[in-house]
Image: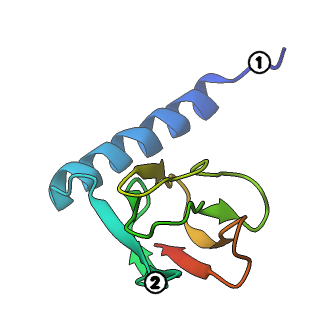
Amino acid sequence: MSSITRRQFGGVLAAGCAGLLLGAREGRAATTHQIEIKSFHFKPERLVIKAGDTVEWVNHDIAPHTATADDKSWDTKTLRKNKSGSITFADAGTQTYYCKFHRKMVGEIIIE
C-alpha cells in the first residue's frame, strides 16, 4: 500500500476541485447520441461525441446486428429488429467498431 504526503494530497484535492468547477462552469450534461442500423450500414458511420456521452445503436433491419469494438473492449450484444443497445464512453480517443455478423459494416466514434 502506498502512502501519500500532505503536499501530494493537497495537489490531488486542488486538481479535483478545479475539474469540478470547470464542469460546473461548462454546465454540460452528458448526451445520448443515436446511430441507426439501416440497409446494413451504421448511420452515421462516423460520430464525434464528448467523454461521458452515451451512444445508442438501434437496429431497423430484419437481420440481427452488433456494434463490437475492434479491440473487443465493448459490445452491444445481438440487436434484433427494433432493438437497441448502448455504450457510455468515458475516455477521449477513437473507437472503431464493426458488426460481428456482417464484417463489412464498420463505424467510428471519436470521443473528445
Q: Are marks 2 and 1 in contact (CB under 8 Å)?
A: no
Residue type (three-letter) at the residue carrying disc 2: Ser
Name the residue located 53 percent from the left edge and 37 percent from the top edge. 12
For label 1, count other residues whose C-alpha is less than 10 Å away and answer few (under 14), some (14-19) or many (20+).
Answer: few
Q: Residue furthest front?
A: 62
Establish if 28 lies above or below 5: below
Instruction: Nearest to the eye among marks 2 and 1: give it.
Output: 2
The x and y percentages for residue 26 are 19, 61
Q: Quadrant of the N terminus?
A: top right
Residue type (three-letter) at the residue carrying disc 1: Ser
Q: Hey, which quadrant is residue 44 in on the image? A: bottom left
The x and y percentages for residue 29 are 21, 52
Q: Disc 2 designates what residue? A: 39
Q: Is residue 27 left or right of residue 16?
A: left
Which sits in the foreground, 45 or 81?
A: 81
Q: Disc 1 designates what residue? A: 3
Q: Is residue 93 left or right of residue 62?
A: right
Element type at marker 1? Answer: loop
Name the residue located 53 percent from the left edge and 81 percent from the top edge. 40
Name the residue located 79 percent from the left edge and 63 percent from the top edge. 71
Q: Is residue 28 left or right of residue 14?
A: left
Establish if 99 lies above or below 89: below
> How many numbered discs, if any?
2
Q: Residue furthest top?
A: 1
The x and y percentages for residue 86 are 44, 50
Element type at marker 2? Answer: loop
Which sits in the foreground, 43 or 81?
A: 81
